[in-house]
Amino acid sequence: MLLLQFVSACFAVIVASATNIRPLVVWHGLGDYASSEGMLELQALFKKEYPSIFVHSVYISEDEDLDRRAGFYGSSNEQIELAAAQIQAIPELKHGFDAIGGQFLRAYVERYNNPPINNLITFGSQHMGISDLPVCKRYDFVCQLARRAAKAAVYGDWAQQNIIQAQYYRDPYDYGTYLMKNRFLASINNEVPDQRNQTYAANLASLSNLVLVLFTEDKTVVPKESAWFGSEPIPAPDYSAQSRFTAWNGDDRIPMRKQPLYLEDWIGLRKLDEKGGVTLKICKGEHMEMNACWREIVAPYIGGEM
Ligand SMILES: *[C@@H]1O[C@H](CO)[C@@H](O)[C@H](O)[C@H]1NC(C)=O
């Protein structure tokens, strides 16, 4: 009897280990079409590499056109809430998962993280926002309309509720307005001094790994260093004042480890980094041009056992 129990226990362990590959969630909702192409390509490559892995691709709408539209139009906060509900309803994900995507998945970690993300890999993401709006492809009218609307009133209430790119637009020369009006990025970056949320920091620091991938020729994410939590310097209120910004030559970037967000650890990034959990990686090429770079980057973080 005892032996039988022992044998069946062993069998259970074997069965469990065969099926306990950590699932993967992919979210292509990054606000531009090039990236969704990249994400779909990546997903296809994935299924080939790890045939038994459970993969869920987050969608805002099951209709492909509407889903694509959701990359431009809507509320980031609402889309993240919807994604969280979607993830929570999938039994295969209930013990946690690894994830590939962008700042929306980082927001999921900070605000929900239930079920928890283990490793998060972000490709060409706008962690410190964009200081210019990406140029659209020639015949991409959905993109062009959104861009025009965003440019016209980027910090207006309407754009902040309805135009995705406006919600991660962060102009260093108008930082005060950004802090006051931005409804999404300023929140997930805990940039507004009296509104910092400690849960965000605790959740982000609980990741095993955060892998930040920068594309060397990225022209969609401006500046491209945003993918590594870099940004252009914020000028002192009095531009002519003697400050470290007066020497700015236009190409300088404040790297992650010199950002106030990091130094004062508003979001748990420093804590995660100090325990070895933040990795900076490079892909050669334009935004979301995965080419050969993805396999080597993701291999150590995806397909592990639970
Ligand atoms: C902080 O964030 C958590 C997680 O999203 C939320 O439940 C909580 O209400 C927030 N706290 C404040 C003070 O907004």
Image (spheres, rainbow, N blue to C red):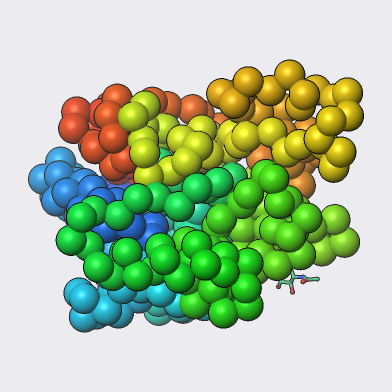
Residue nearest the observer in this picture, 84 or 282? 282
Measuring from the top left, give residue 268's x and y in whole percent.
Answer: 70, 44
- Look at the picture and state if 248 lies above or below 40: above
Residue nearest the observer in this picture, 178 or 46? 178
Q: Residue at coordinates 68% horizontally, 23% vertically from top-left? A: 248
Q: Residue at coordinates 29% horizontally, 35% vertically from top-left? A: 286
Residue 15 appears in the picture as rendered: no
Residue nearest the observer in this picture, 291 or 46? 291
Measuring from the top left, give residue 218's x and y in whole percent.
Answer: 36, 35
Location of residue 272 (image quadrant): top right
Using residue 226 as the reference point, say whether residue 39 is left or right of it: left
Residue that sits furthest to the front in the current view:
240
Residue 258 appears in the picture as rendered: yes
Location of residue 5 (image quadrant): bottom left
Using residue 208 as the reference point, say whether residue 198 is left or right of it: right
**Quadrant of the image for the N terminus?**
bottom left
Instruction: Point out the quarter of the image occupied by ligand 1.
Output: bottom right
Measuring from the top left, give residue 73's x and y in whole percent.
Answer: 41, 74
Using residue 42 as the reference point, say whether residue 17 is left or right of it: right
Measuring from the top left, give residue 22's x and y in whole percent.
Answer: 35, 51
Q: Residue at coordinates 22% horizontally, 62% vertically from top-left? A: 140
Q: Residue at coordinates 27% horizontally, 29% vertically from top-left? A: 285
- Look at the picture and state if 38 lies above or below 196: above
Residue nearest the observer in this picture, 92 or 276? 276
